[in-house]
Image (tube, rainbow, N blue to C red):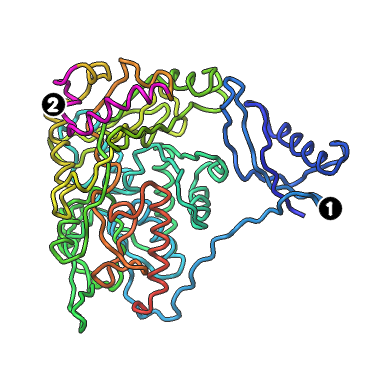
Amino acid sequence: MRYRITQIKIDPGQGIEQLKTGIEKRIARALHCSPTKVRAGNLEIVRESIDARKKPDVKLVYTVDVDVEGKLPFEEAVRETYVPVPASATDDMAQPVIVGFGPCGIFAALILAEAGKRPIVLERGKAVEERVEDVRRFQSGETDAPDPESNVQFGEGGAGTFSDGKLTTGIRDIRIRKVLEEFVAAGADPEILYKQKPHIGTDRLQEIVRNLRRRIEELGGEVRFGCRMEDIMTETEADGRQRLKGVRIRRTGAATEEGALPEIEELTADAVILATGHSARDTFRMLYDKGAVMEKKPFSIGVRIEHPQEIINKAQYGDPALAEIIGPADYKLNHRCGNGRGVYTFCMCPGGVVINASTEARTQVTNGMSNSARDGAYANSGLLVDVRTSDLEEHPLAGIEFQRRYEKLAWENKAVSTYGAFRDDAADPVRKSLPGFAADAILEAMPHLGRKLQGFDREDAKMTAVESRSSSPVRILRDEKMQSSIRGLIPAGEGPGYAGGIMSAAVDGIKAAEQVLLSKNHR
């Protein structure tokens, strides 16, 4: 019989043998026999977490599945498996189109390709190899503005390619296991299947997204880089509702310059999954003008804050040397201000770096990223404040202009400073680059956050503004079948307002692909 054993604690640095010993002791106590009589074979780690409540006596805590002869007073191990939606028996539908090749678009394309539907993916940016070079040139200062089509936000893998590659999520869904297994098959470390806070790292993600693309192509899918969806074609149905008929794309890549492909092309499509990501501002404007029903949604604005990683290790582990064994420490903090405004840390990058993630010239958008080793000297995270819809003008796209206003201010102010200066000087460049309510909220929250994490409010903590792209400021409305107000257009993932990170975006992409396969309208 296979059982699930929980709360097996071992010391950091100990190996699998100590883990097996702990399991055998647990089973022996349950059976009232000697541990020497227990042999827990075929051990599989289901979950690994860190218990640092009694610093510096930190423990690793495991949940495992084991095969044991006989009946035990433990829960039987049950592993749910993702079951794909069967494809339509007919092949009369046009090839489904996916706009965007971030986590949502990648997994939507993979599911459709596995079902034999040969999806066409349109990605306005470049393949990851070229994209990395474009980003390097901008980050190093070789160019004074980002490539508008190939940058930290646009290109193969989406914004997640230049991040910490965190795979944590607050959602619960059987599709999560499918996503993790596909990442492992594409080259990720198998430990992401059981780590409490799994991550991949920017360096590994570049290889993994390339391998996922090759898998999609092997299954008959097609990924077109340098292809921006510029317009959609619709017709009016008898009930007055618009139905999608196709998309118009503009090519921006080298092939167009060489005359090998037309600059403008129209594709017939009756199913388009919109997986653009949160920074496709021109696409949102086009869809609004075309009549897609959308609304403004809450998002956040703030700064990126940096500390020496050793300070975080000491605060979280008690003994900073433990970081050499179990990895650099992270944190997640929040505070509710007296006026109800929320302040929280976001996308914490242990051992990482702060980067400029802007997509437009003369703007400064800050973000963080780290490689798989997380071995940099500094830790960074977003320090963000809630932006409510009541803070914005009435227009559904008002959040975009709100973001842009402060991104321009941050560039004009050269908004890099320290917490001490931010606190003491009303003319501080970072403070001047935030809306007043956000600066006030951070000032109120910092002492409280410093009490939760010793050293967080140290005066020399570096602050860079403005962090404005943590989530989309727009939601494109959809029904229970994920259809927008334009039939055939399926908004999915982070950009249209339905996800908040790599995992939730990937899961939403799978759901969108399932709806394409299930819809009678596409058979």
Disc on res. 413: 2
Total labels drawn: 2
Residue 398 pos. (x, y %): 15, 49
Residue 145 pos. (x, y %): 16, 36
Question: Does 310 appear above or below 329?
Answer: above
Question: As shown in the figure, which amino acid type bears the numbered disc 2?
Answer: Asn
Instruction: Judge by depth and name the residue closer to the eye, 446 or 318.
Output: 446
Q: What range of the chain is rendered magenta?
A: 425-451
Residue beneath the point at 36% across and 80% down: 92
Q: Is residue 432 magenta?
A: yes
Residue 74 pos. (x, y %): 74, 49
Which residue is identified by label 1?
70
Between discs 1 and 2, the one toward the N terminus: 1
| Residue 27 in which image quadrant | top right
Predominant secondary structure in magenta?
Answer: helix
Tell me: 140 left or right of 521. left
Q: Circle 1: is it few (<14), some (14-19), or many (20+) Cα within 10 Å?
A: few
Q: Circle 2: is it few (<14), some (14-19), or many (20+) Cα within 10 Å?
A: some
Question: Does 246 appear above or below 106?
Answer: below
Q: Secondary structure at mark 2?
A: helix
Rendered-image quadrant of the C terminus? bottom left
Tell me: 261 left or right of 338. left
Q: Farthest bottom residue?
A: 238
Question: As shown in the figure, which amino acid type bears the numbered disc 1?
Answer: Gly
Estimate the spatial distance between the alpha carbons at disc 1 and disc 2, rounded to whole Å: 70 Å
Rendered-image quadrant of the N terminus? bottom right
Residue 259 pos. (x, y %): 15, 58
Q: Is residue 71 magenta?
A: no
